[in-house]
Amino acid sequence: MAGLNLNSLKPEEFSKIINSFDTILTDCDGVLWFQNDPVENAANVMNAFLNSGKKIFYVTNNGTKTRDELVDKCKKLHFTATTDNILCTSYLTAKYLQDMNFKKKVYIIGSPAIAKELDKVGIQHTGVGPDPVVGPLNCELIKPDADIGAVVVGFDEHFSVIKMLKAATYLNDKNVKFIGTNTDERFPTSNKMIIPGTGSFVRCIETCSERKATIMGKPAPYVSSLLSTQYKIDPKRTLMIGDRANTDILLGKRCGFKTLMVLTGVNSIDDINTWKKSSSNDDKELIPDYYTSTIGDLLPHISIKK
Ligand SMILES: [Mg+2]
């Protein structure tokens, strides 16, 4: 039965479910922490999963940090992690291009993290940062680089019309690959400011290039195929934990994982109840198998191997 409240179960039933998985995938923001504030007991839960012999992966659509930077963040917040436990979209982008034996140069609209991950696998790129235009747009502004073989779009605080113009011009050649790190519409924030998410930039370049990007992040299946081929995970014995239905839960549903929504982030119990009542299949797909208030609820139920 989809949409089961784990806290409505007897403790032994709750424990049986939680201990039935070999692999735990978890989203980060809204599940484990809010920016630099950890969720209570989140680190204890993830460390307990690790100590109980499970494979764990931090799967985040955040493309503004490298794997190394996320390991540092994990350590600072007392989560045990190495780069092997981290799947972020800056890394996935570099890995995707490396696996296809990409030898050309990348035009990046995005953050320094994407540039650093490309550097790590020896893929050339155009760099990141401001690209200001003085005066009206004209054809002289762009001198196309014949080596460009891919356009990557991520979160870019220096996003601009000239970057749109360059990306669309490169993408006019159908041989040039088009990659978007993720499609999140907004960043969750605790105040009233709305921060546009990477999806806003990706959709913008899709519109002016009249092409569709290949997406690296959740709910696109690339991360799951990587987990299957590289880490040999068994989807049926994998739990995906998330706070956002249209990325975390949808990824799990599409890849045959069990899904657990925590109510500390984007979606609420009201959302789950609305989807349960809806007749739309798109809404039904968003209902997690299980939900609970916070990831901290899992702590008493994880059996540590002696
Ligand atoms: Mg989240």
Image: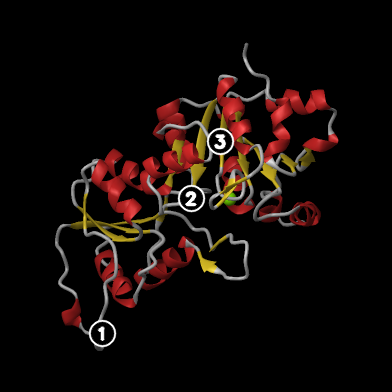
Residue that badge 2 annotates: 61
- The reply, left or right, for residue 287 in relation to residue 86 is right
Instruction: List x then y, in percent, for residue 168.
Output: 30, 70
Residue at 50% across / 27% down in the picture?
233
Q: Quadrant of residue 99?
A: top left
Bin the neighbour count of mark 1 within 10 Å (Cα to Cα): few under 14, some 14-19, many 20 and up: few
Query: What amino acid is labelled 1 in the image?
Result: Leu
Instruction: List x then y, in percent, for residue 120.
Output: 26, 42
SS of the residue under disc 3: strand
Residue that badge 3 annotates: 25
**Mark with earlier residue (2, 3):** 3
What colour scheme governs how the chains and residues are painted in the rendered image of this protein? secondary structure
Q: Quadrant of residue 201?
A: bottom left
Query: Of tags 1 and 2, which is closer to the observer?
Result: 2
Instruction: List x then y, in percent, for residue 204.
Output: 42, 70
Query: What amino acid is labelled 3 in the image?
Result: Leu
Residue that badge 1 annotates: 137
Q: CA distance from mark 3 to mark 1?
A: 46 Å
- The reply, left or right, for residue 161 in relation to residue 228 is left
Q: CA distance from mark 1 to mark 2?
A: 33 Å
SS of the residue under disc 2: loop
**Mark with earlier residue (1, 2):** 2
Please report contact status of discs 1 and 2: CB closer than 8 Å, yes or no. Answer: no
Q: Compared with residue 96, is residue 191 higher up or lower down, i.e. above or below?
A: below
**Mark with earlier residue (3, 1):** 3
Q: Any mark on residue 306, and which? A: none
Q: CA distance from mark 2 to mark 3?
A: 13 Å
**Quadrant for the C terminus in the image:** top right
**Quadrant for the N terminus in the image:** top right
User: Cβ of disc 2 within 8 Å of ligand 1?
Assistant: yes
